[in-house]
Image (tube, helix red, strand yellow):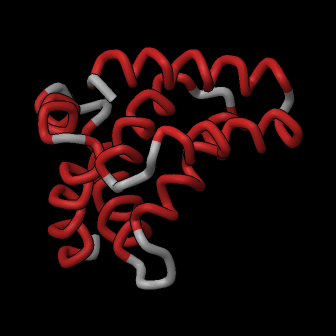
Amino acid sequence: MNQDLFDQGPQTRREVLGADYVDAAIANADDFTRPLQEHITQYAWGDIWNRPGLDRRTRSLLNLAMLTALNRPHELRLHVKGALRNGVTKEEIREVFMQTTIYCGVPAALDSFKVAREVFKEVGA
């Protein structure tokens, strides 16, 4: 384990996904899921999200497109909220999903639009 990356991870993860979600994910980890939480914390949030090549806003836009392509609505919901926290506008989110309509398919984009509308309503955006 790279302790420096692991130590950076929780702060970044909380800043993007929100402290409530992250704290619950960590608190609910058990012997089976704890290694996954540690892996995500170190590599995704400590390393990738802190690399200098892209800012968080750009990373959020990419995640929205990738999660649409993978049809992962639970993760998409989290990352729509994260994108808003990272300064992405509703209009930009819409444009990402419009782009995914062509490259990922209409059903995937429709689901992403639905999830985003639910998140916008939930957070008052």
Of 52 and 8, nearer the camera is 52
For the point 67% across and 43% down, the residue is 95
For the point 66% across and 34% down, the residue is 68
For the point 50% across and 32% down, the residue is 76
Above or below 95: residue 48? below
Of 115 and 117, nearer the camera is 117
Count all numbered tags in the image, as a single digit.
Answer: 0
Q: Is residue 52 left or right of residue 14?
A: right
**Residue 103: x %, y % from top left:** 86, 42
**Residue 109: x %, y % from top left:** 73, 27
Of 104 and 118, nearer the camera is 118
Q: Is residue 3 left or right of residue 16?
A: left
Above or below 45: residue 63? above
Quarter of the image that includes the N terminus: bottom left
Of 124 and 42, nearer the camera is 124
**Residue 37: x %, y % from top left:** 29, 44
